[in-house]
């Protein structure tokens, strides 16, 4: 009989996001008259911006004409989108359009990059952080990993490890804590990477939410990063593309690693990997992403980003007024809420669900250092957050929360 990948047995029986999706669907089926307020999965809450809808429709119509026929998209992305990203997102940061590779999401890029790594690489992962990195790493049969804690005592900011790592996955602003690293904190990781000849994989999915002046919007603002870092950015959260799928990897030509003893550039390997395993992102999606980078689309989507951040401020203030320990929400649309009364993350999840009909994300799903916290997504509305705070104030006895 055929044999399957034994590494699957190293994974938990159900993936965090699948558990939450299942619980959401059970709740909807079983309590049809209750209004549940969902602050769990970080998915958009506002409709697509008009400039993006127009670009999608125009591109589809264009494809229905003889002159506008489009077949397979270029594997690394249409030149118009790669150039617009270089110009709009990386102006002054020495990143060229051919160092930008369009994809269908950071999730794909962050797990597919493992194809390039030596099987014996030692890889460091933040705890807590987005769980797909470690899960896919384990699924690939790799074993050498190190957890880098982000604890309350450290303000949820990780420190470069004492041990040697070949690769470090960093997510900043971090999902789930919503806390972002400053220039000097990122500089410490770049210095570590240069000393250890390591690579940094930087997930910048939430960089569009950065408001703090000392937090960079790209790793390439940090001297030395062009020789040690790959950066991932996405249109999912900045432009409402969770359902459309468009993102990109930035791989500078100066980025090198060892292949059979020799130092070689990484981008030709990524190009080979993508050419073999990826067929590109659809034309209308790339046209829509392009529209989102142009002045009209940018103004509309930046307004949406401000709305989500204002929801974060509102929710955080409400929780702090209830004397809760709550972090994040300044540079990211996530709040990281310490569970009261030593409740575990899943106990507090159940408590919020049953007592207040609020759905959060249990912090433990993001790594062992997420135990004792829940994450709230503020991709939401002022009305929903007022209602949530109202339920917390009126339905829960203060002695439970304090
Ligand atoms: C989340 O809830 O963490 C996000 O929706 C995950 C993602 O962007 O894939």
Image: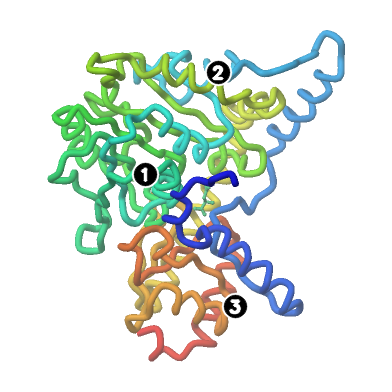
User: Relative to 50, does residue 401 appear above or below in the rendering?
Assistant: below
* Residue of label 1: 171
Task: Give the residue at x 19% y 48%.
Answer: 159
Number of marks in the image? 3
| SS at badge 1 | strand
Question: In 3D space, how far apart are the residues under numbered discs 3 and 2 (Cα atoms)?
Answer: 47 Å
Foreground: disc 3 or disc 2: 2
The CB of the residue at mark 3 lies under 8 Å from ligand 1? no
Task: Give the residue at x 35% y 68%.
Answer: 371
On residue 357, which mark appears?
A: 3
Q: Is residue 87 visible?
A: no
Foreground: disc 2 or disc 1: 2
Give the x, y percent position of residue 359.
Answer: 56, 70
| SS at badge 2 | helix
The crowding category of the residue bearing disc 3, from other C-alpha atoms within 10 Å (few below 14, some 14 to 19, many at least 20), is some
Choose top left, top right, bottom left or bottom right for residue 20.
Answer: bottom right
Choose top left, top right, bottom left or bottom right for residue 319.
Answer: bottom left
Give the x, y percent position of residue 215.
Answer: 31, 41
The CB of the residue at mark 2 lies under 8 Å from ligand 1? no
Foreground: disc 3 or disc 1: 1
Q: Between residue 128 and residue 165, name the one nearer to us.
A: 165
User: Relative to 182, does residue 394 appear above or below in the rendering?
Assistant: below
Q: Between residue 70 and residue 270, name the one nearer to us.
A: 270
The crowding category of the residue bearing disc 2, from other C-alpha atoms within 10 Å (few below 14, some 14 to 19, many at least 20), is some
* Residue of label 2: 275
Mark 3 near mark 2, Cβ–Cβ under 8 Å? no
Question: In 3D space, how far apart are the residues under numbered discs 3 and 1 (Cα atoms)?
Answer: 30 Å
């Amino acid at each position: 009989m055929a044999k399957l990948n034994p590494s699957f047995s190293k994974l938990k029986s159900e993936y965090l996001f699948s558990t939450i999706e299942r619980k959401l669907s059970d709740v909807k089926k079983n309590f049809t008259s209750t209004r549940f307020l969902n602050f769990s999965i970080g998915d958009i809450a506002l409709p697509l911006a008009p400039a993006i809808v127009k670009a999608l429709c125009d591109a589809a119509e264009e494809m229905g004409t003889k002159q506008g026929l489009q077949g397979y998209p270029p594997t690394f992305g249409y030149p118009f989108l790669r150039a617009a990203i270089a110009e709009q997102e990386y102006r002054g940061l020495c990143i060229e359009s051919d160092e930008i590779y369009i994809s269908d999401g950071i999730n794909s890029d962050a797990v597919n990059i493992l194809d390039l790594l030596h099987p014996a690489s030692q890889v460091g992962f933040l705890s807590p952080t987005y769980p797909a990195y470690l899960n896919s790493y384990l699924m690939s049969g790799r074993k050498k990993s190190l957890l880098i804690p982000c604890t309350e005592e450290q303000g949820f900011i990780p420190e470069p490890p004492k041990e040697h790592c070949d690769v470090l996955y960093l997510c900043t602003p971090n999902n789930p804590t919503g806390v972002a690293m400053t220039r000097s904190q990122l500089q410490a990781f770049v210095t570590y990477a240069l000393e250890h000849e390591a690579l940094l994989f930087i997930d910048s999915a939430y960089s569009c939410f950065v408001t703090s002046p000392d937090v960079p919007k790209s790793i390439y603002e940090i001297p030395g990063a062009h020789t040690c870092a790959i950066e991932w950015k996405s249109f999912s959260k900045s432009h409402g593309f969770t359902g459309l799928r468009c993102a990109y990897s930035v791989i500078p030509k100066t980025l090198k690693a060892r292949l059979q003893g020799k130092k070689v550039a990484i981008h030709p390997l990524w190009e080979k990997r993508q050419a073999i395993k990826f067929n590109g992102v659809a034309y209308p999606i790339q046209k829509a992403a392009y529209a989102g980078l142009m002045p009209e689309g940018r103004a509309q989507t930046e307004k949406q980003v401000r709305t989500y951040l204002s929801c974060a401020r509102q929710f955080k203030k409400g929780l702090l007024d209830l004397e809760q320990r709550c972090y994040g929400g300044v540079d990211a649309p996530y709040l990281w809420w310490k569970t009261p009364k030593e409740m575990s993350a899943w106990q507090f999840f159940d408590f919020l669900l049953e007592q207040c009909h609020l759905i959060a994300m249990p912090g433990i799903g993001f790594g062992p250092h997420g135990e004792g916290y829940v994450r709230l997504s503020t991709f939401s509305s002022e009305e929903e957050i007022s209602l949530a705070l109202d339920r917390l104030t009126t339905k829960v006895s203060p002695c439970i929360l304090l």
